[in-house]
Image (cartoon, grey):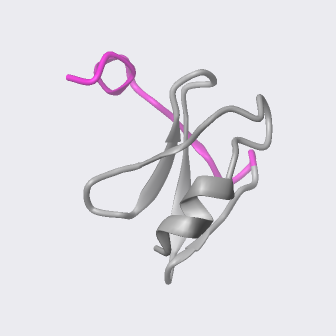
Amino acid sequence: MDPKLLDILACPLCKGPLKLVADKSELICKTDGLAYPVRDGIPVMLETEARTLNTDERLDK
């Protein structure tokens, strides 16, 4: 994913920052506890497509 795109993307719910996971398959919003999928290099920024982070993911374990 283009680093410039990552700089301007924000969580659609809280407008907070997103973090790209190491395998580049998801964008994480720690504030809302959601992971938005990245499909074919395109972030899917829909709440209905996001998955809820588990406790370990929220705590960075």
Q: Residue at x 26, y 55 (%)?
A: 22
Q: Residue at x 45, y 55 (%)?
A: 26
Image position of 54 (left or right of 4): left
Classify 44 as above or below 52: below
Image position of 9 (left or right of 23): right
Q: Residue at x 78, y 43 (%)?
A: 12
Residue found at the far left of this picture: 61
- From the viewer's side, name the closer residue of 24 and 5: 5
Examine the residues drawn in magenta and state their main secondary structure.
loop
Instruction: Find residue 35 and report its horizontal and vertical position in percent.
Output: 52, 43
Classify 18 as above or below 58: below
Query: What segment is highlighted magenta in the picture?
Result: 47-61
Residue found at the far bottom of this picture: 40
Whether residue 49 is in magenta: the answer is: yes
Instruction: Find residue 8 and report its horizontal and vertical position in percent.
Output: 68, 56
Q: Residue at x 28, y 20 (%)?
A: 56
Whether residue 23 is in magenta: the answer is: no
Instruction: Find residue 53 and report its horizontal and vertical position in percent.
Output: 46, 30
